[in-house]
Amino acid sequence: MVVKFADRLARLSPGDVSAIVQMAWEDRTAFETIEDRFAWSESDVIRLMRHELRPSSFRLWRERMRGRTTKHRALRSPDMKFDDRTVADHRRANG
């Protein structure tokens, strides 16, 4: 059964939506971390950002994310010495 975006969005608390948006803006938090924590894929996050942000803010975010290697674990250099799961640990939904 395919669950519609609107239904999936309705299941998120305002705190979850806020956490996903904040994690999506962060350079160090990979989309995989968001998927691990919330079961939202990169394409889901893009749809959420389009829904939650003003059009101009969405365009700025998309331009910023385009080609950013830190947003995808597989593209990261092995020299990067941070764990985005740890960086994002404080992103807990609060209601």
Image (tube, rainbow, N blue to C red):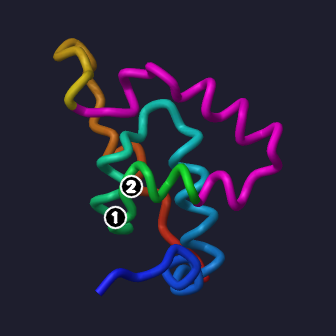
Q: Residue at x 38, y 26 (%)?
A: 70
Q: Residue at x 39, y 63 (%)?
A: 40
Label 2, on which residue? 34
At label 1, counting other C-alpha atoms closer than 10 Å, the crowd grade (few under 14, some 14-19, many 20 or more) is some
Q: Position of residue 44 (x, y in %)?
A: 46, 59
The tally of labels here is 2
Nearer the observer, 74 or 66:
66
Q: Residue at x 78, y 39 (%)?
A: 57
In the picture provided, is 14 more to the left or to the right than 85? right
Tell me the amino acid under the disc marked 1: Arg
In the picture provided, is 51 more to the left or to the right than 87? right
Q: Tag on residue 37?
A: 1
Magenta segment: 48-73
Quarter containing the C terminus: bottom right
Quarter containing the N terminus: bottom left
Q: Position of residue 21 (x, y in %)?
A: 60, 54
Q: Position of residue 26 (x, y in %)?
A: 54, 38
Tell me the amino acid under the disc marked 2: Ile
Disc 1 from disc 2: Cα separation: 5 Å
